[in-house]
Image (cartoon, rainbow, N blue to C red):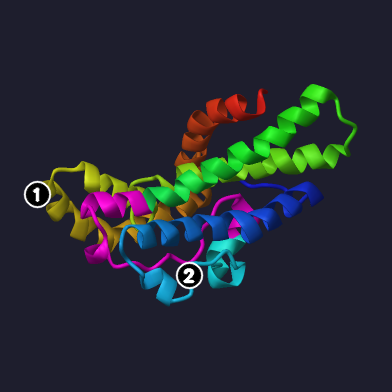
Amino acid sequence: MLFNLSPEFLIAAGLILLVALPFHEFSHALTAYRLGDSTAKFLGRLTLNPLAHLDPLGSLLILVAGFGWAKPTPYNPYNLRGGHYGEAIVAAAGPFSNLVLAAAAALPYRYIVWTGMDVPFIVLQVIQLFVYINLILMVFNLIPIPPLDGSKVLYAILDPRTAMQVRPVLDQYGPLFLLALIFLPGFIGLPSPLGIVFEVVIGPILTLLLGR
């Protein structure tokens, strides 16, 4: 799914890079810190400063495709309370932060629409895109393929023996499969599986938040 480089999209993408991605990684760092691991804090990642978090390729994808990533937040899973469940909570904190931002941005949008407040139409477009891209980031990061956050949630859900068997394989080949999932369909002219997932999952949430 490609976005045109309209002014409203560039503004929304800038907000994603400066607000949403740093908040996503900060949420990982803060959750890990609260669960007993200070690795991210010691490495300067327990911050909302975008410069501490942005990844060049992930940032470029935000501008081109509307989804991407920041630099992974480092943590030591052996320091976390709760074992694999603690690791899953740290992982889930990032996507959950995007849902929080989407819901927070939807509140002024609904107020503007409900009251008929006279604002430039581009403001509504930027808010819509900001909500939409945050939902994309939430769903994208919950895909259970390493290095995405959903893989850690998957490992916590699986029984320990199965997780021990599949984790080395997924951790080794998951990034390659993810890149193929993102780029290969466009090269061979097939519908994007990610686009289909986004449409099916995000549509109802977007309607709930924005009321349209």
Q: Residue at x 78, y 26 (%)?
A: 113
> Of the numbered discs in the image, which one, if any, rests on residue 45?
2
Which residue is at the far bottom?
Answer: 43
Q: Distance between the residues labelled 2 and 1?
A: 33 Å
Tell me, yes or no, if residue 99 can be seen here: yes
Residue nearest the observer in this picture, 83 or 141: 83
The quadrant in which residue 61 appears is bottom right
Give the quadrant of the N terminus.
Answer: top right
Residue 42 lies left or right of residue 125; in this view the side is left
Tell me, yes or no, if residue 136 can be seen here: no
Circle 1 SS class: helix
Mark 2 and mark 1 residues within 8 Å of each other at the beta carbon: no
Q: Locate residue 211, reporting x and y percent.
A: 66, 23
Looking at numbered disc 2 in the image, what kind of residue is underneath it? Arg
Looking at numbered disc 1 in the image, what kind of residue is underneath it? Arg
Of callouts 2 and 1, the N-terminal one? 2
Circle 2 SS class: loop
Residue nearest the observer in this picture, 165 or 20: 20
Q: Locate residue 88, reporting x and y percent.
A: 30, 50
Report which residue position mark 1 lands on.
161
Q: Which residue is drawn at 59% across and 53% down?
A: 20
Q: Residue at x 42, y 65 (%)?
A: 73
- Magenta range: 61-90
Q: Locate residue 199, reporting x and y percent.
A: 53, 32
Let me know if residue 75 is in the magenta part: yes
